[in-house]
């Protein structure tokens, strides 16, 4: 025997496909073994095994058997073409699954925060996933702490109108911090430190107790974790560093005072 031949049982063990399924593929002409033993048993070649692998790829992508048969019978496609096609299809599936995972993560984040808004309301009010991002950030920083309990309790009670007001407050603070940075004001300028204090009081009033030490912890998180600081740096590169420095300067000012 110059080429390897495999019995149906060996093929089943190698691929996890049942013997019954292999028999069915033979019966419909999708995968016909290249040889038969003198006793009439099916014998599969390496080429047959490769064809089965192609079939299993397409089955994993939810193609029907008739569609797979047509693809494999297409003379315009060689083996490399099929591999490239399968890779592209798998890439599309991965993207869809990643989007599904991201959607699930966002919803879990909202539930951790105790949000009672629907996903559509959150999208209409926030225009992105920042409520969920904030939930993940708060849990990461304060999970199990009094701040986390406070944030969850307050957030769960907010209506859509409350969140719209909170968003407007946040946007105003962030916009003025960005304008100060663009104007070249140093982070320890009294006007910028006043904005940092406004930022702290907003958190203290809306979400959880936020003294200057807690505010410092948040500022460090803006720099230590790309995900946490990305909302600021999406507005302008370097804004997370600027806000961090302003918060630190404001906390130092409060300590001196």
Image (cartoon, grey):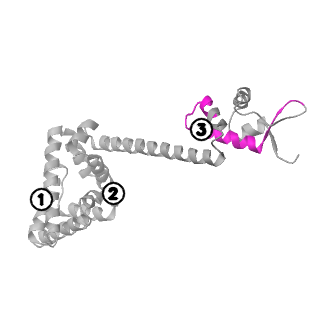
Residue bearing mark 2: 227
**Element under disc 2:** helix
- Check residue 159 in the rendering and tell me which mark sits there, or answer none: none
Residue mark closest to the camera, 1 vs 2: 2
Near-viewer residue (219 or 257): 219
Q: Does residue 200 show up?
A: no
Q: Marks 3/1: CA distance? A: 57 Å
- Identify the residue at horizontal 34%, vertical 61% (top origin): 226
Q: CA distance from mark 1 to mark 2?
A: 23 Å
What is the magenta range? Answer: 39-68
Q: Which residue is mark 3?
A: 58
Q: Is residue 108 above or below residue 251?
A: above
Going from N to C along the chain, the mark reached first, 1 or 2, is 1
Q: Is residue 47 visible?
A: yes
> What number is the disc on residue 198?
1
Name the mark nearer the viewer: 3 or 1.
3
Q: Main secondary structure of the magenta part?
A: helix
Q: Position of residue 207 (x, y in %)?
A: 19, 49
Question: Does the magenta-highlighted stretch encompass residue 44?
Answer: yes
**Residue 66 horizontal/vertical position (percent):** 62, 29
Determine whether the residue tagged by mark 3 lies in a helix, strand or loop: helix
Q: Secondary structure at mark 1?
A: helix
Tell me which residue sits at (20%, 65%) in the image: 243
């Amino acid at each position: 025997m110059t080429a390897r031949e495999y019995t149906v049982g060996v093929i089943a063990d190698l691929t996890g496909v049942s013997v019954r399924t292999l028999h069915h593929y033979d019966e419909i002409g999708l995968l016909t073994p290249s040889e038969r033993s003198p006793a009439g048993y099916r014998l599969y070649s390496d080429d047959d095994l490769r064809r089965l692998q192609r079939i299993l790829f397409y089955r994993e992508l939810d193609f029907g058997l008739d569609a797979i048969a047509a693809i494999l019978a297409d003379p315009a496609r060689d083996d490399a073409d099929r591999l490239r096609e399968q890779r592209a299809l798998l890439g599309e599936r991965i993207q869809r699954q990643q989007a599904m995972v991201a959607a699930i993560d966002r919803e879990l984040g909202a539930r951790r925060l105790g949000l009672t808004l629907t996903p559509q309301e959150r999208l209409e009010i926030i225009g992105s996933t920042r409520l969920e991002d904030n939930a993940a950030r708060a849990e990461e920083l304060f999970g199990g702490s009094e701040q986390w309990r406070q944030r969850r309790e307050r957030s769960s009670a907010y209506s859509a109108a409350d969140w719209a007001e909170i968003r407007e407050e946040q946007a105003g603070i962030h916009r003025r911090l960005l304008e100060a940075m663009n104007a070249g004001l140093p982070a320890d300028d009294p006007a910028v430190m006043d904005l940092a204090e406004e930022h702290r009081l907003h958190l203290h009033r809306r979400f959880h107790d936020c003294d200057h030490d807690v505010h410092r912890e948040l500022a460090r998180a803006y720099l230590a974790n790309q995900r946490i600081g990305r909302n600021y740096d999406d507005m302008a590169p370097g804004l997370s560093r600027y806000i961090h420095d302003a918060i630190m300067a404001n906390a130092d000012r409060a300590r001196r005072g």
